[in-house]
Amino acid sequence: MIIGLISDTHDNMPYIKKAVEKLKEEHVKLVLHAGDYISPFTAKPYAELDVPMIGVFGNNCAETEHLNRVYSEVDCDIRGYFTEVKADGLKIALFHGHRKEDVEKAQTGDYDVVVSGHFHKSSIKEKNGKLWINPGELCGYLYGTNSIGFLDTEKRFAWIAEL
C-alpha cells in the first residue's frame, strides 16, 4: 500500500491542489496529514482524493472545531494532536512535532513509522528501529520547497516528491 504524507500546508491552495493531483497519480490508499492546515477553507480540494485522510492539528491550527467539521465533510478524520494509525501491518505515530510530549511518546512507543511535520524540512531517517519521516513543507513559505512524502508499507520505504 502507498500512503501519502503531507504537512505544513499553511493555506497554500495552489499547492494543496497540486498535492492532491500527485497523490492521485501515485494511487495512494490513505493520506496522513501532520498538521498546520491553518484555515477551514483549505479542506475542499481533498474531496478529490476519494481515499481516507487522517490528520492531526499543528501549532498554527486555531479553529480546531471548525477544522474538524469541514475536514470531516471531505473524509478526513482529524484526531487531535497525536494519533496512532495502523496500516497494512505497520503501527504509525502521527503528530505535528511542536509538543515535547508527542515527540517523547513517538520515541518511546512501539511504532514502526513516525510521521511528523513542523520543521518545514523534509527528512527520512532510521532511528532506533523506526522509520522517521517529515514530508517537509507543502506551502514552500520557509524554504521555497513544496514537498510531500510517500510511504510504501510493503517495502517499508519512503520518498519525498517536490511539486
Image (cartoon, rainbow, N blue to C red):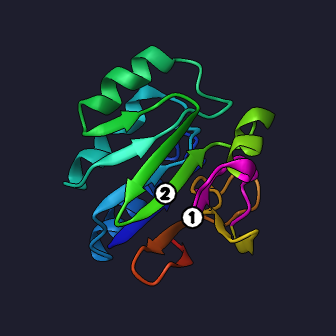
Say what amino acid the circle numbered 1 marks: Asp
Say what amino acid the circle numbered 2 marks: Lys
> Badge 2: few (under 14), some or many (20 or more) residues near its Cα, within 10 Å?
some
* Quarter where residue 75 is shown: top left
Q: Does residue 13 appear in the picture of this structure? A: no
Q: Residue at x 76, y 52 (%)?
A: 119
Main secondary structure found in the magenta portion: loop
Q: Element type at marker 2?
A: strand
Q: Residue furthest bottom?
A: 155
Q: Residue furthest front?
A: 110
Q: Which residue is mark 1?
A: 112
Image coordinates of residue 55 in percent, x first then y, are: 46, 41
Please tell me whether residue 108 belongs to the stretch shown in magenta.
yes
Image coordinates of residue 67 in percent, x first then y, are: 42, 24
Do labels 1 and 2 touch, CB within 8 Å?
yes
Q: Residue at x 64, y 56 (%)?
A: 137
Q: Does residue 29 appear in the picture of this structure? A: yes
Q: CA distance from mark 1 to mark 2?
A: 5 Å
> Which residues, given as a range, are shown in magenta?
107-122
Image coordinates of residue 28 in percent, x first then y, are: 31, 68
Please tell me whether residue 118 belongs to the stretch shown in magenta.
yes
Q: Nearer the viewer, residue 78 or 163?
A: 78
How many numbered discs? 2
Q: Element type at marker 1?
A: loop
Relative to 89, 142 lies left or right? right
First reached walking from the N terminus: tag 1 or tag 2: 2
Q: Which residue is mark 2?
A: 91
Q: Residue at x 62, y 34 (%)?
A: 58
Image coordinates of residue 162 in percent, x first then y, are: 56, 74
Location of the N terminus (image quadrant): bottom left
> Badge 1: few (under 14), some or many (20 or more) residues near its Cα, within 10 Å?
some
Q: Residue at x 76, y 69 (%)?
A: 127
